[in-house]
Image (cartoon, helix red, strand yellow):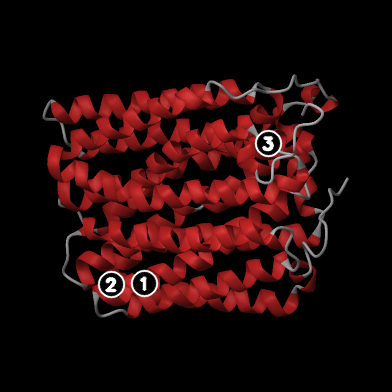
Amino acid sequence: MSEGRPEPSNALGVLSFRYLWLNSITFYMVANALRFVYGWIALEGLDANESVQGLMVFLLGLPGIFLLLPAGVWADRLNRRKLLLGTQLGTALVMAATAIAIGSGVLTLGLVVVSALVAGVSTAVGSPVRTSLLPELLPSKLLYSGIALNALALTSSLILGSVSAQLVGNRFGFDGVFWYLAFLLLLGLIPASRILMSKREATESDRATMGEAVREGLTFVFRDRALRTLFSLLALAGLVMNALMFVTLQAVVKEELGRDAGDAAPLLALMGVGLAISSVFVMRSGEMKNKGTFFIRAMMVGTACLFLMGRATSYGQLMVLAVIMGCAGGIFINMNQGLIQSNTPPELMGRVMGLFTLVQTGFTPIGALILGVTAAAIGPGNTMSIASAFAFCVVVYTYFTSPELRTLGNGTDSVKL
């Protein structure tokens, strides 16, 4: 920054972050819409049951289980901007190819399976790159501001992604939806191409094998008790909470309330409204203390909301719970990513973010598959309540038995070397 120029008060004052943020809005719109769209096609386009719906989301996330950790190594070793551009372009091509196939009259289970798998590959490789760019582009004092703004980009995707995909699908059919998603991804490449990166210096880790590099990142996380506990709760959220929100809720709307599965989209939008409210609160609060306590209490509120969603008897009840769920989700997202990134050295950021993405989203397809089968057997409402009650008990137990997590983030975080 040149002398005499005032320092930015928030992350949007940093030009390259602003380009990344604009790109993230379009990317997150597509990423969050995809789970909805593939589930919608399964339930309405193919007239399948909840098991097939869960299978679609499982296949969308399956590549991440195998690719996210290696992708974290690539994010640490390669040009992150080029990786970001390449993977997003790849996803756009998958969307366009799927649109062409459906428009030609080919809407089969096989097509949807292949489309979900290939889209999962490109998004998995690009995910650690996106999150690891934040601490590279921002000074440490603006990191939480950047994370909160990134959460607002995620919020806009929850509000606009599924709802806009539903509107496009209702007007132009399923092929129109995939053309729309391809357009969003290509639009996001414009600001991403203008991100300026500092030249990266080679490190000793670059000479390590893929296995050695992955182990180095895993060892860093699991040798610290607080981070280890934090990642364990993130795995629980990915396996249970995310699957309930983005998959089982859609089945609850259809099977329990007798509405179209597409009516889950406004609920996701309301979650986005709640997430925006709490993200703005975090951004305006500056350097907050007791971040670990905020994080785990937000998980308690979120699991309680999911339990009540499973017992809901009207769409209006789901709407109220969705807003509360979103408010808790905003605290959850901002605190967990900030705690991890502020305690991770730059040379390990890609690998740690690969593990972060794996436990948060890579476990979701496994949970979606398990919960989809369970919902087909005992009903989606019962599945949602039972699974969330289990998660709530785990979170409460962790709260009282892990003081190191409650105090993580007190004062100024520092990197553990």
Asked if marks 3 and 1 touch (Cβ < 8 Å), the reply is: no
In the picture, the disc for residue 350 is: 3
Q: Amino acid at mark 3?
A: Gly
Per the model, the C-alpha gap separating discs 3 and 1 is: 35 Å
Provide the residue designation for mark 2.
Answer: 379
The residue at the point 56 percent across, 75 percent down is 300
Instruction: Specify few, some or many for label 2: CA neighbours under 10 Å numbering under 14, 14-19, or 20 or more.
Output: many
Q: Tell which circle, 2 or 3, labels the residue nearer the N-terminal end.
A: 3
Q: Amino acid at mark 2?
A: Gly
Given this view, does label 2 or label 3 mark the residue nearer the observer?
3
Out of 290 and 228, give the one closest to the viewer. Answer: 290
In the picture, the disc for residue 383 is: 1
Residue 388 falls left or right of residue 257: right
Numbered disc 2: secondary structure:
loop
Asked if marks 1 and 2 touch (Cβ < 8 Å), the reply is: yes
Residue 38 falls left or right of residue 350: left
Given this view, does label 3 or label 1 mark the residue nearer the observer?
3
Instruction: Specify few, some or many for label 3: CA neighbours under 10 Å numbering under 14, 14-19, or 20 or more.
Output: many
